[in-house]
Amino acid sequence: MKHITITGDLGSGKSAVSRILAEKLSGKTLSTGYIQRNIAARYNMTTLELNKYTETHPEIDDIIDNELKKTADSNDLHIIDSRLAWFFIPDSFKVYLSVDIQVAAERIREDSKRITETYDSSLKAAAAIADRKKSENKRYLSYYGADCADMNNFDLIVDTSSVSPEEVAEAIIKGYEKWMLGC
């Protein structure tokens, strides 16, 4: 079974869509964002602070990368919510979820599960999103040679700004089914 790897903009709904896909396709989920937020909490840092720390401490990325590599070898279908799973699992169905930055800022601000990412305004959330994206893209390009901004790396791109997670999941399932026929 080929895995589905989902990456995209912060606040685009990757985790919610991954859970829906796992349920509809009877697959398992792995979220490196969840792993990263737990590491940030252990270090008593925000996610943005951890990203900047990781720029000079690659061992943090190694922890996350090892989880991805273990999952890649599994025969079970996994829906993997991760910035770099598309890179580490090249034979996966690679999905990029995009979202308007203001929509993303509101989603993140209202998400009570993001304990290391709390903001008192959408403006501050949008600024943090932009900083984090810049930090991650720089790190991934220099550390791995992975260009997350190159949309040619993905099999399907979905703008989630004005659609529900269920609608996004349905679009991904249709794309995945077509992609599987071509494998």
Image (cartoon, rainbow, N blue to C red):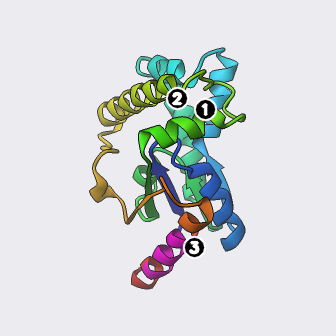
Find disc 2 in the rendering and name its residue: 122
Q: Is residue 25 above or below residue 90?
A: below
Tell me: residue 46, above or below residue 168.
above
Give me the C-alpha separation between circle 1 and circle 2. Answer: 7 Å
Q: Amino acid at mark 3?
A: Met
Mark 3 vs 1, N-terminal side: 3
* Picture coordinates of residue 114, whole percent (x, y): 66, 32
Secondary structure under the numbered disc 3 in the rendered image: loop
Mark nearer the N terminus (2 vs 3): 3
Which quarter of the picture shows residue 75? bottom right
Q: In this rendering, is residue 177 above or below 66? A: below
Q: What residue is shown at x 44% (from left), y 85% (from top)? A: 181
Cα distance in 3D space between marks 3 and 1? 36 Å
What's the amino acid at mark 1? Arg
Tell me whether the residue at label 2 lies in contact with that at label 3, contact meaning CB atoms closer than 8 angstroms: no
Residue extending farthest to the bottom is 181
Mark 2: secondary structure:
helix
Picture coordinates of residue 132 (x, y %)? 44, 28
Quadrant housing the C terminus: bottom left
In the picture as drawn, the residue positioned furthest to the top comes out as: 44
Magenta stretch, main secondary structure class: helix
Distance in Å between CA atoms under marks 2 and 3: 40 Å
Residue corresponding to mark 3 = 1
Q: Are marks 1 and 2 in contact (CB under 8 Å)?
A: yes
Which contiguous range is marked in magenta?
Answer: 170-178
Pick the front one: 98 or 75: 98
| Residue 172 shown in magenta | yes
- Locate residue 48 relative to residue 153 in the image: left or right: right
Q: Position of residue 40 (x, y in %)?
A: 62, 23
The tag on residue 109 is 1
